[in-house]
């Protein structure tokens, strides 16, 4: 029933290339939510400094609410990490891409330890995975 309202509100959001302020956004959300709620965080992160700030704030949110963390799988990153190097630059790209993947996995494991559900999928697969996660949450009567 509420999906139309959610879509209308999301359509009003202004796109920005600026850095996300997780502390400000999640603190404001935590202040506004009065009852235990299901919170879905759609985001992506590149560096561990940004991820650490984000995880710290999600941890505070997860103490009172059920959080589903959704991040988009980067096909280019996977391609670079999995390619067989032909030249030295290919090897360098593969090493850097694998390091990014390793850091992402560490962040997702940390979120799991905090009790946060996470979904990491290519853009076209996020919606069905999120719906399946929601159905599991409802069946488990977690909210």
Image (tube, rainbow, N blue to C red):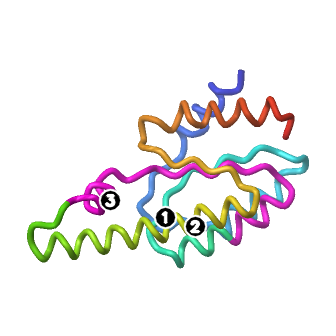
Marks 1/3: CA–CA distance:
13 Å
Contact between marks 2 and 1 (CB within 8 A): the answer is yes
Q: Which residue is mark 3?
A: 77
1 vs 3, front mark? 3
Q: In the drawing, does residue 65 fall left or right of residue 24? A: right
Q: Which mark is residue 45?
A: 1
Residue 30, by quadrant, is bottom right
Position of the N terminus by quadrant: top right
Could you tell me which secondary element the residue under label 2 belongs to?
A: helix
87 and 143: which is toward the camera: 87
2 vs 1, front mark? 2
Q: In the drawing, does residue 7 fall left or right of residue 23? A: left
Name the residue: 29% across, 74% down: 95
Residue 79, position as x, y percentages in the image:
27, 55
Disc 3: CA contacts within 10 A as few (<14), some (14-19) or many (>=20): some
Residue 88, position as x, y percentages in the image:
12, 77
Magenta segment boundaries in residue numbering: 56-83
Q: Which mark is residue 86?
A: none
Name the residue: 51% across, 38% down: 126
Contact between marks 1 and 3 (CB within 8 A): the answer is no
Q: Which residue is mark 2?
A: 107
Name the residue: 58% across, 32% down: 7
23 and 84: which is toward the camera: 84
Marks 3/2: CA–CA distance:
16 Å
């Amino acid at each position: 029933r509420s999906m139309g309202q959610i879509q209308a509100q999301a359509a009003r959001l202004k796109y920005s290339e600026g850095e996300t302020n997780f502390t400000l956004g999640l603190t404001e959300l935590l202040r506004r939510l009065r009852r235990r709620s299901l919170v879905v965080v759609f985001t992506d992160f590149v560096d561990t400094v940004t991820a650490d700030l984000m995880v710290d704030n999600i941890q505070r949110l997860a103490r009172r609410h059920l959080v589903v963390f959704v991040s988009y799988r980067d096909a280019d990153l996977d391609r670079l990490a999995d390619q067989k190097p032909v030249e030295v630059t290919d090897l360098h790209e593969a090493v850097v891409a694998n390091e990014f993947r390793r850091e992402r996995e560490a962040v997702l494991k940390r979120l799991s330890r905090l009790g946060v559900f996470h979904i990491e999928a290519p853009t076209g697969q996020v919606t069905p995975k999120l719906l399946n996660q929601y159905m599991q949450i409802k069946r488990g009567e977690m909210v």
